Amino acid sequence: MARKKRSPEREALIKQLIAEYQPKTAQDAHDTVKDLLGDMIQGLLEGELEDELGYSKYDYHEKETNNSRNGYSKKTVRSSSGNIELDIPRDRNGEFEPQVVKKYQRDVSNIEDQVLSMYAKGMTTRDISTHLKSVYGVDASAEMISRMTNKVLPIAKEWQNRPLTEKYAIVFMDAIHYNVRENNAIVKKAVYIAIVIKLDGKKEVLGMWIGGNESAKYWLGVLNEIKNRGVKDILIMSVDGLSGFGEAIHAVYPQTEIQRCIVHQIRYSTRFISYKDIKSYMKDLKLVYQASTEDIALQQLDALEDKWGKKYSSSISSWRNNWPSLSTYFKYPLELRKIIYTTNAIENFNRQLRKVTKTKSIFPTDDSLFKSLYLAMMDITAKWKGKPREWPKIMEQLFIYFEDRISTADLD
């Protein structure tokens, strides 16, 4: 991948660093970064003491305490860039307890973790730079913070290529779209996302893939990839109504049962219903998809067509044409129906991603986008502790429905 073109600000910063540090080798450049990290931490410590005392170093007019600065003590700490020498500021009364580098702390790699945490919650590099400046008085350029967050990329790509479990109970697939700069143009790209519920009921993100416009062809590539990474079987897959999606799934996993998202289908089939009729039409349509059995649902679909067929034939035809993948959930118990009839699980995840990335309307590279999504994903999924309600009851029935494909040994 070609290197990003330098901005004037970036050019000036690089020239300033080269003039000051005069690096000759790659190791010299690494030492420069370490020294800058040390300056950043030093500035954080100075800011903490200033806040503790209530006045800046040379502004005695604002002094409202009998306490004062009392020199420094030397301390060597470990960081992800190596050992760093710090001067820990002291106060005259011995009351100052620094929080950035605590009294007995010898490892400060968590400073970078704090930056990553802010980045994961949607703050841009410039936001973080401004925050550090306003709170701690530390000059940390957006470029420096970007370099710190870039260290997560190898970890993110290792996660993306990790080996996968052989069997999954349910997989949800959907895409979310972002603007990315590519070849001096702004391109809208789809991020293909898969979320799974494992046989033990725990939920996790299977992966995130950045591609062009959403298509069944790209999903086919994703499915082949996860198969190559170890996924031998998927019991049920919940997806949207993308044309050709079902065929792509069965080309890789021919036994997988497909549940087309009912919510997507409702949106699609009611797009052209007159606002005068929508309330009455939706009341009748609910009798179809909320029916207790498939037979009753088909009876209600016939009734819907008798009443509305002449006026809205295309809407009703879309239900009939897609019925095999829309009606899958009727065979399952109510507890499982609620999970698979819609892709809400992944749409809720996508909504949280949008909330985190809303301040970044355009991403400079695919890597920049993937880095942001990975950090946001790690932050979001840290809260995923529970299992679906009644999961043991659901599994009892899945063992019966798929007796030739799963067993209790798969739970080990």
Image (cartoon, rainbow, N blue to C red):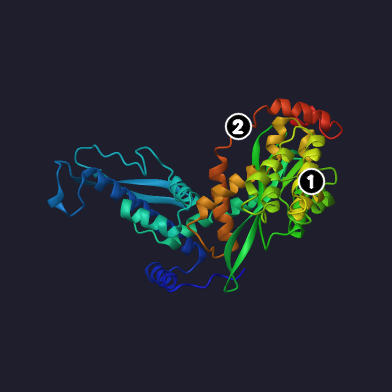
Residue located at (32% from left, 42% from top): 98
Location of residue 101 in the rendering, given as x and y in whole percent from the top left corner: 37, 43
Residue 143 versus residue 56 in the image, above or below: below
Find residue 51 and report its horizontal and vertical position in percent. Answer: 26, 46
Tell which of 34 and 289 is nearer to you: 289
Q: Which quarter of the figure is the C terminus placed in?
A: top right
The quarter of the image holding the N terminus is bottom right
Q: Evaluate whether residue 409 shows in this view.
A: no
The residue positioned 80% from the left and 46% from the top of the image is 323
Which residue is labeled 2 in the image? 386
Front tag of 2 and 1? 1
Q: Position of residue 246 (x, y in %)?
A: 79, 51
What's the residue type where badge 2 is placed?
Gly
**Residue at the extreme right:** 404
Marking on residue 40:
none
Q: Amino acid at mark 1?
A: Asp
Q: Report which residue position mark 1 lands on.
A: 306
Separation of disc 2 and disc 1 at Cα?
45 Å
Residue at 36% x, 40% y: name it.
102
